[in-house]
Image (spheres, helix red, strand yellow):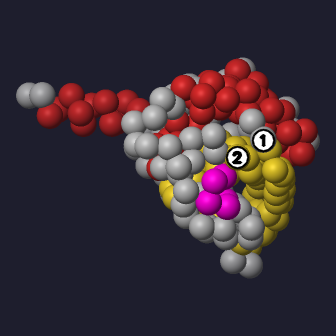
Amino acid sequence: MDIRKTITLVEEINSEYGAPAHEPLRRVAVAAVFKNPLAGAAAGADLKPLIDYSLELGASLTRTALAALGASPAQLRAYTKAALVGIGGDLEHGAAMIHPRFGMAMRRAIRRGRVIIPGHAKVGPPGTTIDLLYGPIDEGWDLDAFDSTPVLIHDAPRPHEIVLWVGYATGPRVNARCKGPDQKEVDALVASFRT
């Protein structure tokens, strides 16, 4: 694939709303902007080239993200993925990049990841914002790991491009304190529906 450029964003949040963080939150988001080989193709075109490429690109973006974050896989608490397709493409081109195989490459690189990786795709012109939706890596009911951050690239995606994002975070939201049910409580509630 023809990658035009990559972008790496790293942030460390030490306080929110005037209160210091219990622990700093470090997040990284890495994007690749590349030519969409299916742009302009008829609906129903074979998505296999994009699915196959997502494994390679997922591994590469994850390596870049971990190096930029300076964290070991054991230090990670949340992850995310997203695709933004230029207006010459199809929403399914983005879905093909992030849903079938991309998450497997992310998990393989960190040797973790029981929980589904929040991710979504959308279509838009250059400068379109997309929200990276972070979710917990191993514990589905780790509600404090859920977070989001908007990202954009001023000159991407061009009509025949895709922007593919991967992100990781080392901690919970800063000063997170919303406690919810645990898995046992949810299982009991769902079991009660059957009676």
- Circle 1 residues within 10 Å: few <14, some 14–19, many ≥20: few
The answer to whether the residue labelled 1 contacts the one labelled 2, judged by CB atoms less than 8 Å apart, is yes
- Circle 2 residues within 10 Å: few <14, some 14–19, many ≥20: some
First-in-chain label (1 vs 2): 1
**Residue 159 location in percent, x, y?**
62, 60
Q: At 50% from the left edge and 43% from the top edge, which residue is drawn?
A: 41
Q: Which residue is mark 1?
A: 2
Q: Which residue is mark 2?
A: 35
- In this rendering, the answer to whether 77 lies above or below 124 is above
Give left or right: position of 1 versus 185.
right
**Residue 175 location in percent, x, y?**
67, 62
Which portion, as a residue range, is magenta? Answer: 157-161
Can residue 119 be seen here? The reply is no
Q: At 75% from the left edge and 36% from the top edge, which residue is drawn?
A: 1
> How far, Cα to Cα, is label 1 from label 2?
5 Å
Q: Tell me where residue 48 sits by quadrant.
A: top right
The type of residue carrying mark 2 is: Lys
**Residue 7 location in percent, x, y?**
82, 54
